[in-house]
Each structure stands twice: as C-alpha cells, then as structure tokens.
Amino acid sequence: MVKVARVLVAVASVLTLGVPALSGTAVAAPPSAATSGALPGSGVVAAPVRVAVTDDGDVGYREIGSGPPLLLIMGLGGTMDNWSASFVAALAAKHKVVVFDNAGVGKTAGIATPLTITGMADQTSALISALHLGPTSVLGWSMGGMIAQALAVLHPSQVSRLVLAATQAGTGKATAPAAAAAAAASSDNPSVVLSVLFPASASAAAQLYVLSVLRYQPFYTVPPKVKAEQGTAIDDWFAGRDAAGREVASVKVPTLVADGTEDALDPVSNDRQLAGLIKGAQLALYPGAGHAFWFQDERGFLARLGTFLG
C-alpha cells in the first residue's frame, strides 16, 4: 500500500528545488497564494479545519457544501488534504462533503491499540454521530475503503450508500499486490512511488495531483508510528483477522465498487471479488487508470458518482 504523505513530502522537496520529478519532465512550481484563489476548489482549500468532540476522541475535519451528507475516508499514510480540492468541490456542489483525518493524524485523537480497521470505523461512526449527519453516503479510498466496509457492517444505520474505491474485501481471499509493486510503494524515490499510484501513461495527471495537494497549507504528514500501525491493520484485514472484514457480504446498502484497470496495488480480480460479495453492487472499471483512478479520470468518475449518489 502507498504511504501517500511521505511521497508528497518528497515530491514537495523536488518541486521546491525545481528538479525534474517524473520521467525527466519538469514540474511547474506549486500555485502561489496570489494565484490559487482563481483555481477550482479554492473554497475547499480555504475551508477551516474544525474539531468534532466525539465519544471516541476529537476528530479533525472540514465541511464543504450543502445537501445530502457525503463522507470521504482517506487511505494509508494520507491526510484529509490528500483529496484534491477540485474533486471535493465538484462533490460539494450537490452534497455536504465531510473530509477528516483518521485516528492519530492531524487533530484527530489516537484510539486504543493495536490500531485496527474496525477501531477506525468505530471512530468514524462517532464522527457521524457528533456531526448529526444521519444516514450518510460514504466513499473510501484504499485503506479508507476498508474502513468504509467495516462502518457499513458494524453501523449499518449510518450508511445510506457506499462507494469502495481501489480497495479489497477483508475475507482473507483478496490477492496481494505483486512484489515489485509493493517494493515500489515502499520506495523513498517519489517518482517511483507515484508510478504505483499512476501508470506511466498518466505522468501528467500525477504531476497535477501533487500540485493540487500542495495547495493546502500548512502541509502536514502522518506520524511514522501511526503509518506503521495502519500498515499492520491493513495486513490483518487482508488476512481476514479483522472480524468486520469477514462480514462484508452482510452489507445491504447500494454499493459502487470502482478502480482503474491498471491499479498495480489492487488487481482487478479483487474489485470483481468485492462487488460479487455485496448483493446488487455495481462495478466501474476505468481503462488505463491506476490506484489514483479517481483523480486520473476525475471527470468520468464524478459523472458516475453523480448518477450513483442521485
């Protein structure tokens, strides 16, 4: 799995130095404060980080837009600022979008150890309750998709619709990423790690993604200890050791499973398996897209989300 925050710190250094970052192609400097106001999603970047006092500790979050609630759950090593502002802004045109930090990240309190996907799902449930969101559409990416599954299993009344992006079932039967992809994901070289998020044909999208994330200030990362704990939680989910993961077939809400066909960290067979476990689940595969398909084919995925969320 990809340690997104560490990657972005490294890429930020590359951008600051003005050194080519991807495939020998120079990357433009991050937008300045003077120009970023004219870019899509400026209202998202400017939205204040708030703190919700929940029954499972404080949770840092942003809330943008109005309408039916939509909660976005980030993956391994990522913060709420790893959602591109343009993506969040498009969703906020018709929804009250809530993005937040997982346990032990940013302003969000840690929870009991060992950290588990179920524990993070319970804290997410506490956030939904504290914000009085009621039944909520939930979109989870990668590890966030695991948390979303556990939330739907353990707290079904809080989930109205479920979008599982580039993620796996926790039955113990999902296919692990190839060794080369796993090694690339752990690399300290930002261009190598970005090559796992985005296929080689999408280097321009990779550059734009980095620039979109760097718009958020101040930039912060996930503590190394928390990233390691997240990795262990994911391993337990993959192995079927998290009880909620073994119960994904009990999910009854409308579900969309989505991924790119070139996702090096999540083979398409996992997407088909996951969609097959949830009765009536829809499957959307984006040709040529990778693990970050939702950004690489943002327009197509947003259109599908609009139809699915209604």
Image (cartoon, rainbow, N blue to C red):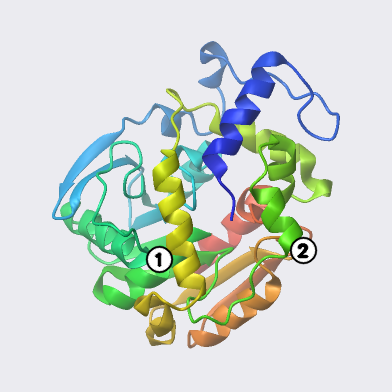
The picture places residue 27, in percent across and down from the top left corner, at 75, 25
Q: Dot 1 corresponds to which residue?
A: 148
The picture places residue 146, in percent across and down from the top left corner, at 45, 66
The picture places residue 277, in percent across and down from the top left corner, at 51, 86
At 21% from the left and 58% from the top, the residue drawn is 126
Secondary structure of residue under mark 1: helix
Residue type marked 2: Pro
Residue 258 visible at all: yes
The picture places residue 297, in percent across and down from the top left corner, at 68, 52
Secondary structure of residue under mark 2: loop
Q: Dot 2 corresponds to which residue?
A: 287
Tell me the distance, in whole angstroms, between the alpha carbons under discs 1 and 2: 24 Å
At 54% from the left and 45% from the top, the residue drawn is 87
State the residue lying farthest toward the top: 34
Q: Is residue 175 left or right of residue 100?
A: right
Question: Closest to the observer: 185 or 287?
Answer: 185
